[in-house]
Amino acid sequence: MLIYNMRKRCKIIIKNMEILVELYPSKTAQIIWDNLPITSNCKTWGNEVYFHIPFDSRIEIDAKSEINLGEIVFWPEGKAIAIGFGKTPLSIANEIRLAADCNVWGFTNFDLKKLVAVDDGDLVRVERV
C-alpha cells in the first residue's frame, strides 16, 4: 500500500504573479488554511512585501526574524503575512531580516525577486490549491 504525505498548498496572487506555497505542518499554517481565501492590499518595506489579514496566530516557539529566501511567514505583531526576498532596512550584509520574530508557515520555489515590481496598495489574494 502506498501512502502519500501530501501537504496542503495555496497560491498567493499579486499582479500577474502566482506564488505556489507548500504549507508546513504548523498551527499558523492551519489557521491560515482554515481562513482562505484572503484578499488584502500589499505594503512594501525594503525587499519585503507584506499584507494584513483579518485573523491572528500566536508566536510559535521556532519563530525567527532572519529568514531564508522562499520562506513565507506570518508576522504576529503586525497581523500580516510577509514575504522577504532581499535586504530590508534592518538587514546586515545580504540577510533577509524582518522587523520582528515571525512564524514560518510555508515555502515556495517561486522567483521571489520578481516581487520588486509590487507597489504599495497592489491587490493580493491567497487561495487554496
Image: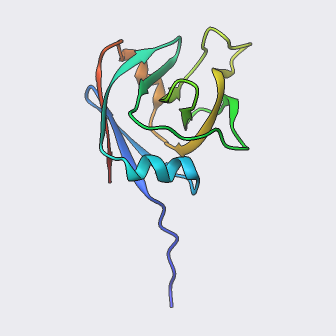
Vertical placement of residue 47 versus 51, above or below:
above
- From the viewer's perspective, tell me whether residue 121 is left or right of residue 29: left
Q: Position of residue 13 (x, y in %)?
A: 31, 35
Q: Position of residue 111 (x, y in %)?
A: 46, 32
Which residue is at the front of the view, 55 or 102?
55
Q: For the point 49% across and 29% down, which residue is it?
A: 79
- From the viewer's perspective, tell me whether residue 85 is left or right of residue 129: right
- From the viewer's perspective, tell me whether residue 96 is left or right of residue 23: right
Give the mark count.
0
Q: For the point 36% across and 12% down, which residue is it?
A: 120
Q: Position of residue 23 (x, y in %)?
A: 50, 51
Q: For the point 48% across and 61% down, which residue is it?
A: 7
Vertical placement of residue 41 versus 2, above or below:
above
Position of the C terminus by quadrant: bottom left
Which residue is at the front of the view, 2 or 39?
39
The residue most toward the bottom is 1
- From the viewer's perspective, tell me whether residue 99 is left or right of residue 79: right
Vertical placement of residue 12 versus 4, above or below:
above
